[in-house]
Amino acid sequence: MKESSKPLRVTSKIGSKKITYFVIKRNVKYPRLEFRGNFLCIVVPKDIKNFRYIIEKKEKWILNKLDFINKILERNKNLTNKFIIFGVPTNIEKFQSNLLSGNKNKVKIRNFLRHILFQKIKNIAEEYSKKFGIKYNKIFIRNQKTKWASCSSKKNLSFNIKILSLPEALINYLVLHEILHLKEKKHSENFILMIKKEFPNYKEIEEQLTNYWFILNNNYWWKNFS
Ligand SMILES: [Zn+2]
């Protein structure tokens, strides 16, 4: 996703809380609020002058959301500094020196991680593709800022590189979810039925994915290497 200009960093008071948010000017028709990691962003049309009212209108929603995120981060403090691979916290230095012979080059590390995840996802995708009789085209590992995964009209599947840190059950779920979207675009009844067959506990998985979203976006390692 290309941003048209550097995000503007703004600190202001919301209720009694001082918070920092980013203003992103982009080719959009209407302004919208979103959380990227634990940062609040307002995406606004390029020519907009006043965006403070958007924040004021949504004050309650923002404060609730911030509270929700902070609680998740507080509960998972132990995962902030560790690199997590397939759900298992690993010592960063040990991981680097064991697998990368001490190579600290960011691009190389990223490519290496991308490769591990690509292989993993490919295996899972092939299995589900056969099982459900749904064909996909290519798999991409990307550095997505706002979502775990997506699919395109060309039947390509894209996955967020941070998925590498998720436990296997969650990765399986995300892969199946995208493959099923090739057949059924929306989260229709039929879509949910197919999901439920494979993951009766999909609601719990979705909840875990939400937690991991904020944990990983706040994780030291991913903040530096993604
Ligand atoms: Zn979906």
Image: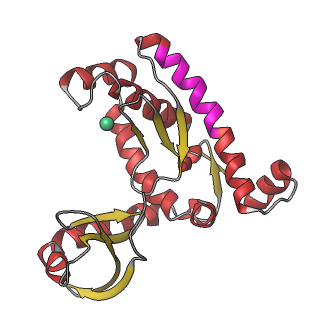
Instruction: Indicate the quadrant of ligand 1 in the picture.
Output: top left
Choose between 100 and 197: the one closer to the eye: 100
Q: Image check: 83 left or right of 47?
A: right
Between 148 and 74, the residue placed more toward the observer is 148
Q: Which image quadrant for residue 120?
A: top right
Residue, far right: 101
The prevailing secondary structure element of the residues shown in magenta is helix
Q: Would you say residue 128 sits in the magenta stretch?
A: yes
Q: Which residues are magenta?
A: 117-129
Q: Which residue is at a point 33% across and 24% down the rendered structure image?
A: 195
- Horizontal relation, residue 88 to residue 157: left or right: right
Say which residue appears at 23% left-offset and 32% top-offset. Answer: 186
Q: Quadrant of residue 57?
A: bottom left
Front-most of residues 206 and 181 = 181
Q: Quadrant of residue 39?
A: bottom left
Q: Pinpoint residue 43: horizontal percent, then vertical percent.
A: 28, 68
